[in-house]
Image (cartoon, rainbow, N blue to C red):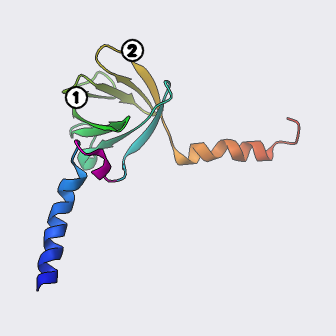
Amino acid sequence: MRTIAAAAALAAALPMAGGCAHHPAEVAAPQGLSYACADGRSLNIRYDGGDPNRMPAHLAIDGSDHALRPVPAMNGLRYEGEDGLVWTAEGDEATLAAAGAEPVRCTRVRESAAAAPDAVQESRPPGH
């Protein structure tokens, strides 16, 4: 009986540990979409509930997790954070802007696209 109670307590505590932005080491492995930015940084954005048009999102970059809320956009998606961070995306292209900094262009990283250049090089004759 004690084992069942302990397992239930652990299961109840797990969802809370994964969402703690103050302790990045406790955050579970990122799930969502990965982007490579022009300034050399990588980021991951997770749209809560799976609907990027209406649900909050979490953007992980530089070891920090930023909570973002959706706002109306002319095209694509637009999210804003309480800390002044702005994320806009349309298709595989996005822009990350922070208060007082120049916006940075980011491109979605797809696993299949990362493998494609190697396949192309292997099919070329030597010296080309």
Q: Is residue 40 left or right of residue 19?
A: right
Label 1 secondary element = strand
Q: Is residue 16 left or right of residue 75?
A: left
Label 2 secondary element = loop
Q: Is residue 7 left or right of residue 32?
A: left
Name the residue rendered at 16%, 82% in the picture: 3
Name the residue rendered at 18%, 75% in the picture: 7
Real-space CA distance between mark 1 and mark 2, rounded to the nearest whole angstrom: 16 Å
Instruction: Residue 55 in the image: state x and y as whole percent.
Output: 21, 40
Instruction: Residue 43 in the image: state x and y as whole percent.
Output: 41, 36
Q: Quadrant of the N terminus?
A: bottom left
Considering depth in this image, is 40 or 128 the residue closer to the camera? 40
- The part of the chain drawn in magenta is 22-28
Amino acid marked by disc 1: Gly
Instruction: Residue 54 in the image: state x and y as whole percent.
Output: 21, 38
User: Is 76 within the magenta?
Assistant: no
- Tell me the quarter of the picture where residue 24 sits: top left
- Tell me the quarter of the picture where residue 45 sits: top left
Does the rendering let one see residue 27? Answer: no
Residue beneath label 2, please?
A: 102
